[in-house]
Amino acid sequence: MVLAMAIISGMVGGGGLGYRSIEALTGPDSGLGVEVGLAIVIMATILDRLLQATARRMQAPVAV
């Protein structure tokens, strides 16, 4: 959800990676689109793994 908000902020001129993604969508530079797309996927993967690890640490231990 946060990465989607980065793209939405690019639509309203927020700058950063969101602006670059909008720039890639509206321009003829397909290489920029691949670069920005891979950056978003890598960021999403890293955030997902970090949040999963944090959630596991915060769970109560299972009683056997």
Image (spheres, rainbow, N blue to C red):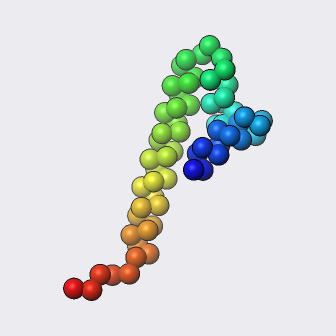
Residue at screen point 44% across, 47% down: 45
**Spot occupied by residue 59 in the image (x, y as percentages of width and height):** 40, 76
Asked if 4 appears above or below 11 in the picture, the reply is below
* Residue 61 in view (yes/no): yes
Q: Quick check: 53 above or below 43?
A: below
Image coordinates for residue 43, horizontal then vertical, percent: 51, 45
Q: Say how many tags the image has.
A: 0
| Residue drawn at (22%, 85%) of the image | 64
Residue ranking furthest to the left: 64
Residue at 62%, 23% (x, y): give it: 25
Residue 20 to residue 43: above or below: above
- Residue 39, compared with residue 56, is above or below; it is above
Spot occupied by residue 33 in the image (x, y as percentages of width and height): 56, 24
Q: Residue furthest top?
A: 28
Residue drawn at the location 49% of the way across and 53% of the way down:
47
Q: Nearer the viewer, residue 53 or 2?
A: 2
Note whether residue 16 is visible. no
> Splitting the image into 4 quarters, where does residue 14 fall?
top right
Residue found at the very far bottom of the displayed protein: 63
Q: What is the quadrant of residue 53 in the picture? A: bottom left
